[in-house]
């Protein structure tokens, strides 16, 4: 296994190309964050000048901010197929997940509480679950198969009379595998259990209509959706009460105190409106598949796919270069923005926890690189990445 010093040496080797002003920079890390859409920027710019009033004040200065906030809520609701009253604006996906899990737990009072989640959730779900365990809750982490899929029967088997919540992400951020949320929803309803899904990665890429999914709560992260960082939303089905994490005045129908940012809410609303025309991203999917075929052509059996071959986000390509180190590969291509789930602990490079949960071998896991494409990714960029990979690896 490579040491941290070997990894640092690889970074040093890439410095010369990093300082080359003619090298083309290519962004393939859209699952980490997206640029702000120009139309979203335009909406924000208009509110910077006239949206300074407090949306709750009720006078002429608050009117533009209140109108923008209302329109934004309706636009988010339209994308999710719910009512505007069911949308709670948050500071992002992490807060939305925390509000869902903790808000429902606090509502239970002293009653025994059991939560079911999966082994490959984002830390924004896993960490709140650990916190709830410290407060006395019991948490069960169901496994996934080799493609990252949860088996709904595994959830059915562990439901108890104390289970009040199932939280399974809609699509995994690393490998892109899409979970069978509608099937899990049927199990949850049959047992009177609420279902939350972290849809930070799926909103704007595939359909996320809450009634089709059958979920009771759904989390949205703006910066995964061509909106700014610092804004997100939680869908809370009508009739469900969550205890607020932030107490104060009765903002967001009493579910989150604090004067709303009409500026950021409007940005998310516009991003959701634009996303309606991008659902399923067929052009991006086609380019993603072309990318994968090019890698197979160049590297043959030395490159393997991580994640489900079909039930996967249309923009996500997580591959392992056998016998190589993903972090090393990226360090040698500093103009390419992509990611790897490996991390350095105690001088050793460790494989991604997601890939470990999928029972991917250490050799394969260490060679993993995630390329996530966006709306503006071009075939020329993909070809350039393949060429750089050939230069580094062949």
Image: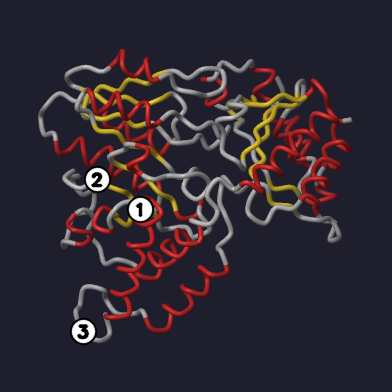
Question: Closer to the camera: disc 3 or disc 2?
Answer: 2
**Which of the two labelled residues, at mark 1 and mark 3, occupies the earlier sequence position?**
3
Which residue is pictured at 44% across the width and 18% down the height? Answer: 143
Q: Which residue is mark 2?
A: 237
Classify 10 Å Cα crowding around label 1: few (below 14), some (14-19), many (20 and above).
many
Which residue is pictured at 58% across the width and 32% down the height? Answer: 175
Q: Position of residue 110 (x, y in %)?
A: 10, 29
Q: Which residue is mark 3?
A: 59
Task: Kindly check if marks 3 and 2 are in contact, taking CB atoms under 8 A apart as contact.
Answer: no
Rounded to the nearest angstrom, the CA distance separating label 1 from label 2 is 13 Å
**Which of the two labelled residues, at mark 3 and mark 2, occupies the earlier sequence position?**
3
Q: Secondary structure at mark 1?
A: strand
Location of residue 269 with respect to 152 vertically, above or below = below
Q: Which residue is mark 1?
A: 233
Task: Kindly check if marks 1 and 2 are in contact, taking CB atoms under 8 A apart as contact.
Answer: no
Q: Position of residue 276 (x, y in %)?
A: 48, 56
Which residue is pictured at 11% across the width and 34% down the height? Answer: 109
Location of residue 124 with respect to 350 vertically, above or below = below
């Amino acid at each position: 296994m490579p040491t941290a010093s070997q990894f640092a040496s690889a970074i040093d080797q890439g410095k010369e190309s990093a300082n080359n002003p003619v090298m083309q920079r290519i962004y393939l890390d859209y699952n980490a964050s997206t640029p702000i859409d120009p139309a979203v920027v335009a909406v924000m710019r208009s509110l910077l000048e006239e949206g300074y009033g407090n949306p709750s004040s009720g006078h002429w200065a608050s009117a533009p901010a209140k109108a923008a906030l209302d329109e934004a809520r309706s636009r988010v609701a339209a994308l999710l197929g719910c009512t505007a009253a069911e949308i709670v604006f948050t500071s992002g996906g992490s807060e939305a997940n925390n509000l869902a899990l903790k808000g429902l737990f606090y509502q239970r009072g002293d009653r025994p509480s059991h939560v079911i989640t999966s082994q490959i959730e984002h830390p924004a779900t896993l960490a709140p679950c650990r916190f709830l365990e410290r407060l006395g809750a019991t948490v069960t982490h169901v496994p996934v198969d080799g493609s990252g899929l949860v088996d709904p029967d595994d959830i059915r088997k562990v439901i108890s009379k104390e289970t009040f919540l199932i939280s399974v992400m809609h699509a995994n951020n690393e490998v892109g595998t899409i979970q069978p949320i509608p099937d899990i929803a049927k199990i949850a309803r049959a047992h009177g259990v609420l279902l939350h899904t972290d849809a930070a990665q799926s909103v704007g890429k595939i359909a996320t209509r809450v009634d089709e999914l059958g979920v009771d709560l759904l989390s949205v992260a703006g910066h995964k959706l061509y909106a700014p960082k610092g804004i997100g939303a939680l869908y809370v089905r009508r009739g469900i009460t969550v205890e607020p994490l932030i107490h104060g005045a009765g903002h967001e129908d009493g579910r989150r105190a604090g004067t709303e940012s009409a500026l950021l809410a409007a940005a998310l609303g516009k991003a959701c409106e634009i996303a309606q025309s991008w659902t399923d991203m067929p052009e991006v999917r086609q380019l993603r598949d072309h990318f994968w075929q090019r890698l197979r052509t160049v590297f043959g059996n030395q490159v393997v796919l991580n994640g489900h071959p079909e039930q996967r986000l249309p923009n996500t390509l997580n591959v392992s270069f056998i016998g190589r180190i993903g972090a090393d590969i990226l360090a040698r291509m500093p103009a390419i923005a992509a990611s790897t789930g490996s991390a350095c602990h105690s001088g050793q490079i460790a494989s991604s926890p997601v890939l470990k949960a999928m029972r991917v071998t250490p050799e394969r896991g260490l060679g993993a690189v995630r390329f996530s494409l966006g709306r503006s990714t071009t075939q020329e960029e993909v070809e350039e990445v393949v060429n750089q990979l050939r230069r580094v690896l062949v």
